[in-house]
Image (cartoon, rainbow, N blue to C red):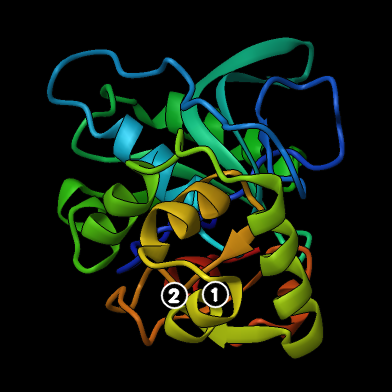
Amino acid sequence: MPSKRERTSSLAGRCARGDASRPGLRRTHGSPIRNVPDTVPNSWSKSGELAIQLLLDPHVTALAFRASLSFLGREVPLRMFVADLDDGGRVAFDIIDERLYRDLDTEGLLLLALESHNVRLIEIDHSEIDAEPRASNTRRLWSHREHQVPAPIKAAVDRALATRQRLSIRSLARIAGLRDPMPTIGALVSQGILAVDPSKPLGSNSIVARRSDPWRFPIAKSSRFSRANP
């Protein structure tokens, strides 16, 4: 049986596509502040950090924590984040530092269940979740998720980006009249309204775009997406 797993140097993911009844987190324009699923089993788990990084990734369109997958009339244990990507694919993330032991039969059944749902599997470890600058960038952005952005500021930001598609944070701040733009940027990114590239240093020269215009946003997919096998 060919392996469906891959080690990658960056984070990303996807979930079973198109089923609105499935529990998860949907990234939609103007969506309310989202909460990370309650999936952290103990104090050393990094599941919460992984969830935040996936939520803020410009290429992730939906995220869910799946306890199991149905296969041949039974529920196969999964306990992984599964995410939809903007190219229509699906990826499940297996945190290898935290997973329970799986024998060959259990492993084979898991791979068959993933294949039946068209989900690709990527193995990831704690060092990859802690990799910089993504780890610090996502924490910084997420820390502003509850910042209240006045409606006129939202409208000014939307108008500026509708005209120019993408701007540096410095330019957007000047146009929208923001003295300290990071709380506003962090809140709107956390709400799925704006997108930035979390894999690059975050500062006044960082490029920002509307989340609704992903095809115009010049972010190359990280190897965590592109190296997963179908």
Is residue 31 found left or right of 63 in the rendered image?
A: right
The x and y percentages for residue 155 are 75, 60
Residue 1 visible from this viewpoint: no
Q: Nearer the viewer, residue 226 or 161?
A: 161
Residue 101 visible from this viewpoint: yes
Give the amino acid at mark 1: Ser
Mark 1 residue element: helix
The x and y percentages for residue 72 are 78, 19
Q: How many marks?
A: 2
Distance between mark 2 and mark 1 Cα atoms: 5 Å
Residue 100 marker = none
For disc 1, the marked residue is 226
**Mark 1 surroundings within 10 Å by alpha-carbon count, few (fewer than 14), some (14 through 19), many (20 or more):** few
Is residue 16 found left or right of 66 in the rendered image?
A: right
The x and y percentages for residue 200 are 33, 78
Is residue 216 found left or right of 105 in the rendered image?
A: right
**Mark 2 surroundings within 10 Å by alpha-carbon count, few (fewer than 14), some (14 through 19), many (20 or more):** some
Q: Nearer the viewer, residue 86 or 175?
A: 175
Q: Nearer the viewer, residue 15 or 211?
A: 211
Give the amino acid at mark 2: Ser
For disc 2, the marked residue is 223
Q: Quadrant of the C terminus?
A: bottom right
Q: Residue at x 72, y 72 (%)?
A: 214
Mark 2 residue element: helix
Is residue 223 found left or right of 135 in the rendered image?
A: right
The x and y percentages for residue 8 are 35, 66
Q: Nearer the viewer, residue 227 or 46?
A: 46
Asked if the residue under mark 1 is in contact with the one under mark 2, i.e. CB atoms within 8 Å, the reply is yes
Quadrant hosting residue 147: top left
Q: Residue at x 74, y 67 (%)?
A: 158
The correct choice, above or below, for 115 with respect to 162 in the image is above
